[in-house]
Amino acid sequence: MKKVAIGLYLLVTVALLIWAYRQAIYDAPNDAAQGEMFRIIYYHVPSFSVCFVFFALSFLGSIGFLAFRHHHPDRAQIADALALAGAEVGVVFCSVGLTTGPLWGRRAWGMWWTWDARLTTTLVLWLIYVSYLLLRRFAAGPQMQTLAAVLGIFGALDVPIVYMANRWWRTQHPAPVFGGGENSGMDPSMVGALLWNMLAWFLWGVLILLFRFRVERRQQKIAAAEAERALNA
Amino acid sequence: MKKLFAALVVAVPVALFVWACYLVFSAPPEPPFDWRLHMSDAQHAAAIAPINHLYTRAAYTVTWAIQLGYAAWLCLRWQSQKQEIAK
């Protein structure tokens, strides 16, 4: 039953990804100013939206770990696995955004990168979470998870700064398309493609997040079994 | 069979990434910055359209390369855990 549900979910996600791709490439019109280049928005914006959601999840997992670590070790391990999965999948989506962005910037602005407020804060966010993953990978000892949780909470504080960066500081990056005031917004013929892509990538993200979560839970069980075996030896 | 699957799972994202790089680096040269002296707006639009097309395709391809690459890494990790448990 579980396998059927997973298979069905995978099928729906892949179908949605194909549908969203069709919407982005064939159905949405070209932008009047940027032409075909504007279509990068259909992968660029959803990647960052999903990335922010998963970093928020990592934030909640980190808080959960710190809250449960003394009295509910099992729950703490679940929260820690969730924090790690959220951070890792968030980094993947953030990497997509940070790769598609320069490709767009090269054509729209004539440069790959600029130290604009939105770009710089996003790069800092990516670096914080990469350092989180490196800490998880290379640090050892009982304090590793606690340190990682603290870093996870610290990293999530950058998310609202990234989101507000092009509202607070008007530099190179365009003003927000949604929620950016009177002159913001998108042509209705393009909104559908963006929303379909957001939904499709979100479902894909949840799928790989759950997979990563399972892998981490399994790893925790292997580590616990090894520790027990070592104690009994 | 398993090794073939693993090789395929790794090869696809790598190939996509290489393809995305190829798309960017094979783009024709851009019109000069003073293009208004040499060509009309329509000619300029026609000159940059193929470059924009290649960059857009590269952005989509690199997205899939990263996503499938990560999914492939997870699959391999899952397999190695299975072997570890079997041991």
Image: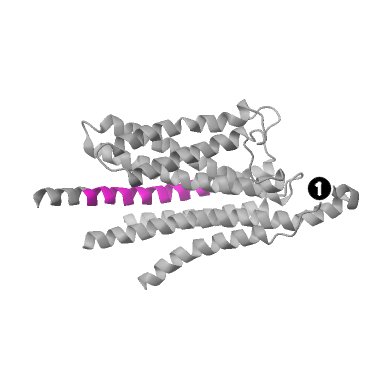
The chain letter for the residue carrying disc 1 is B
Residue beneath the point at 59% across and 63% down: B19
Q: Is residue A199 left or right of residue A177?
A: left
Please say whether residue A86 is visible from this viewpoint.
no
Q: Is residue A7 left or right of residue A182?
A: left
The quadrant holding residue A80 is top left
Q: Is residue B77 left or right of residue B49?
A: left
Residue beneath the point at 61% across and 26% down: A168
* Number of numbered markers: 1
The residue tagged 1 is B33
Label 1 sits on what residue type?
A: Phe
Which residue range is magenta in the image? A200-223
Is residue A154 placed above or below A8 in the rendered structure?
above
Is residue B4 placed above or below B76 in the rendered structure?
below
Provide residue B6's location: percent of width, then percent of height.
40, 66
Q: Tell me the quarter of the image containing the N terminus of chain A.
A: bottom left
Please check the rendered image and state whether residue B53 is part of the magenta-colored stretch, yes or no: no
- Helix, strand or loop: magenta stretch: helix
Residue with the most extreme left position: A232
Residue beneath the point at 63% across and 62% down: B22
Provide residue A54's location: percent of width, then percent of height.
44, 40
Provide residue A11's location: percent of width, then percent of height.
46, 58
Provide residue A205's location: percent of width, then percent of height.
46, 48
